[in-house]
Amino acid sequence: MNTLLKLTFLVFFFAVGCTKKTTPPNPETAEITADTYVKDHYTKKEVTIEMRDGIKLHTTIYAPKDTEKTYPILLQRTPYSCQPYGEDKFREKIGPNPVLMKEGNIIVYQDVRGRWMSEGVYDNMRAYIPNKTDTQTDETTDTYDTIDWLVKNVPNNNGKVGTWGISYPGHYATVSTIDAHPALKAASPQACIGDFFFDDFHHNGAFLLSYFRAISLFGTYKDQPTDSAWYGFPEMKTEDQYQFFLDKGPLKHLNEYFRYKKPDSKAVESNDRIDDFFWKEIVDHPNYDSVWQRKGLIQHLNKVPSSVATMVVGGWFDAEDLYGPLETYKAIEKHEPDNYNTMVFGPWDHGGWSRDKVANTVGNYFFGDSISLKFQREVETRFFNHFLKGNGSKNSGLPEAYVFDTGKKAWKSYDNWPPKNTEKQTFFLSKNQELSTTKKGVNKINFISDIKHPVPYSEDIKTVFTPRKYMTDDQRFAARRPDVLVFETDILTDDFTLAGDILAKLQVATTGTAADWIVKVIDVHPHDLENDNKDMQTHLKLSNYHLMVRSEVMRGRFRNSFSTPEPFTPNAKTAVNIKLQDVYHTFKKGHKVQIQVQSTWFPLIDLNPQTYVDNIYKADEDDFKTQTHTVFTDSSIEFSVLQ
């Protein structure tokens, strides 16, 4: 199997297997085994569908061999390939899940514009164009034209179309709902990208350095159809990513990995030259300017017609796309309150709900058995069947919000999200490491942020393509560092359930002019627990496990505006608010709630120089300075608490 393809699918979806070297992995499934079901029960046809501007998109159609009845169309548009190419080569699994595959549906995959076998030039997170002229195109028009062709040309279709996808294909599922074709009746954006300044490659303006190797997947230029990978991945030649990035120093030293053209032998090589258009976009646009803003999709979800039912799916421990699905659901609810719009969030990492494993774990933490299988069988299948094969009424039998309590390890249904019976409750970061319900004076707690010894995001020695397991990692290793501040409650005498967003309201200072601030919410387990996960790393124990429930970073320069950064005034007390994504988690009786505050998180995010520069991607070695940071004890955490 092509190494580039293997990396592409392994990381941007989830670990998959492949039984034949000539067959690339299916991004929608996890445990692929040799199976001829698709070939035995489906025909395969490859077509090119012409868009309104003449560009032709490669499309693969799997249709049931039983032609005695009609079927709905399930469409996935993807930048990750329709492979295997060739009408005599079949995927081993097709569709959102095996149940829908075996029930019989017309399953369609399409390479989006500029990717793989489709014509055109790829535009990463191609911007939606409001009020288009007849000659203008974007992903909504490409989707519309595709659906229009399919319902008019594919035999035995029932005139109803559903879209689905995970990660980037999830983004295209969201796109399909905007200015939707009348035949589109159901869409399920899953782990869908919402905005690249808050998903995947950035978090609140901080660059996800740990995604470094994925840049070329999106930024290598191509203008002709191809059935082979045209991009390569940077070779780090080490199993220690922490040391690799520490040795590299400033971000500008990574430019060398994004030069693909050989310079003229007589020319002087420029250290600033960048051939990768995505890396150049990141480097040249460090702030949330018009480039990033117009690529965002959330602001356009006021254009989802009531004729399209949506089911947004996400994982509470998705390290890649958690902002996107939460904000997608909330935006549709806000702008289109009468639409059928439901959300499903479970104890999964990126795309975990589509796996066929019985045991459901994220990293070292076990959440239960058959959770994903139940979702596929009882939720996802019911959604698509109701709107594509049933009467399509709002009475689907599914709840508005179907969410998994990651502390109690149980599903719960709600009519709203967040649930109506929640209220805000504030805890203060008090002295003596106390997390208190009342403010106990105003004191300073200082720590040194040493740019030569940043806080690691994981205790593992590893090199990854994109990070995942850290979302449930045991945080004891961090709690025992002097540059990580710890605040915790007494042992809880009753269950304490969080349901909704979290807002950290920090009061801080720094001897420098720039700093990052990271807040982590942690469930400290009792000492007497025994391991329940046979695959837990051998050096860990569930006893006193510090489960990270939620975490987030704020690049301090963006504390007041993501578009207009500003420095800190040295030693001046300054407010920094950090919004953490929603949780649904019960801290059980006998556990403790812990908050950790730190200023580095390496190499999950890049190092802040800690002196203000206009563009961190162009900072010099001399800009990086060790500083002393202060957290004041009138800092607080605002929880959404279920009553």
Image (tube, rainbow, N blue to C red):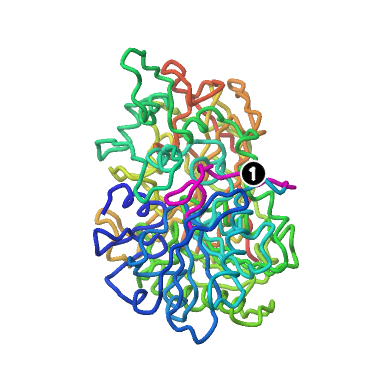
Closer to the camera, 255 or 71? 71
Verify whether residue 64 appears in magenta.
Answer: no
Q: Residue at x 56, y 72 (%)?
A: 412
Q: Which residue is mark 1?
A: 439
The residue drawn where x is 60% and y is 79% is 386
Q: Is residue 130 magenta?
A: yes
Residue numbers of the magenta segment:
110-133
* Residue 592 visible at all: no
Is 316 displayed left or right of 329 in the figure? left
Residue 379 lies, with reference to residue 28, above or below; the image says below
Q: Secondary structure at mark 1?
A: loop
* Label 1 crowd bin: few (<14), some (14–19), many (20+), radius 10 Å: some
Q: Quadrant of residue 197?
A: top right
Which image quarter is the N terminus in? bottom left
- The residue lying toward the viewer, choosing from 341 and 245, is 341
Q: Position of residue 154 (x, y in %)?
A: 53, 71
x, y percent for residue 160: 61, 73
Residue nearer the viewer, 445 or 184: 184
In the image, residue 269 lies at what x, y percent? 36, 17
Amino acid on which the number 1 mark rests in the picture: Lys
Q: Residue furthest bottom?
A: 68
Q: Main secondary structure of the magenta part?
A: loop
